[in-house]
Image: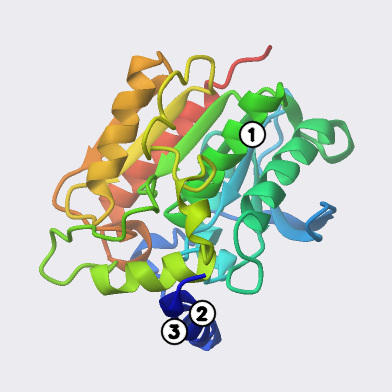
Amino acid sequence: MTLFSSLVARPLARAVQAGPAPKVQAAVTFPEIPGRTKTVTIPTTQGDAETTVYYPPQDLDSTPPVYVNFHGGGFVIGHYEMDDAMCRYLAANAPAVVINVDYLLAPQHPFPAPPKQAYEVVRWAAAHGADHGWDGSRLGVGGQSAGGSLAAAATRQAWKTGGPRVGLQVLNYAPFDLKDPKKRAKAAKPVVRPAVVPILQGAYLPEVADRTDPLASPLHGTNADHLDGIAPALVITCELDLLRDEGIRYASKLRAANALLEHREFQGLDHAFNLLTEETARTREMYDLIAQHIAKIPAP
């Protein structure tokens, strides 16, 4: 463990956790879309994961697919309710059942506990559809920012271990190389400041050797070579985002493996614009894009 991670990163991460949740702007909460939810506790070897399960507000003629969502927050912030509007939107417009996961956080639970738990949640979702009203064979996994990293890690574990079959991974302005903290911001006042990266890195990955692990850094080194057979992906990047370049590079690697469904870049926008700004039309564009891909998850 480095001096920085042991003496600075952990207490700073705990201080961030103790603070209030960032405010989701009212313009992107879509209050006109009703929410039909229930709380489900999912057991894993890493500890129980509390989830909110969103159902389509309308009755359907067929059993809907299921989409497992991992929220953002730099691996340390746990306000999964910030994704409520997106989950309601996807449930209504895909339509699909959306499982919003309150997963383990660093520094209390550093790597590899969160990606291992994420994979077990995905495996549970695939196996328990008949009990809860979704089609577990039509399975999507996705997340925003750190949640996108966990979605990629869960998908990779499913690919490497032979199941469950993931029909879609949505990787939304996510980090793909956590080894190198030197990331360049493109906005004058970036949402993710370069100075914050080593803090999050130190809290989530205190052991330096773990920072090249493919479950933490799927783009690092040769980790993204030979991805043939991994779940098809929708990759979303934002032009001004600190993480844009690695998202583009990972999309290119997926394309080379015939595993890229689409790469969509949102011009002139920064990280988490769908939560922290009043970009209603662009947020709707993003959510419609994700919903369209969820709707197309094929049956086996």
Q: Quadrant of residue 131?
A: top right
First-in-chain label (3 vs 1)? 3
The C terminus: image quadrant: top right
Label 1: element kind: helix
When the figure is inspected, residue 60 is found, relative to residue 79, above or below; the finding is above
Q: Is residue 199 above or below residue 67?
A: below
In the rendered image, which residue does mark 3 sit on?
8
Task: Residue 266: tell me if it is visible.
Answer: yes
Residue under circle 1?
157
Between circles 1 and 2, the one closer to the viewer is 2
Q: Is residue 279 above or below residue 173?
A: below
- Secondary structure under tag 2 reads helix
- Measuring 26% from the left and 36% from the top, which residue is drawn there? 248
| Disc 2: CA contacts within 10 A as few (<14), some (14-19) or many (>=20) | some
Measured Cα–Cα span from mark 3 to mark 1: 31 Å
Where residue 258 appears, x then y in whole percent?
A: 40, 13
Q: How is the image coloured?
A: rainbow
- Indicate the position of residue 196 as horizontal and vertical percent values: 33, 73
Residue 6 circle label: 2
Q: Across the whole image, how many numbered discs are drawn on residues?
A: 3
Q: CA distance from mark 2 to mark 3?
A: 6 Å
Q: Is disc 2 in contact with disc 3, using a CB cutoff of under 8 Å? A: yes
Q: Is residue 92 visible?
A: no
Front in this rendered view, residue 32 or 199? 199
Give the amino acid type for the residue marked by disc 1 in the picture: Gln
* Residue in the image at 71% along x and 51% along y: 117
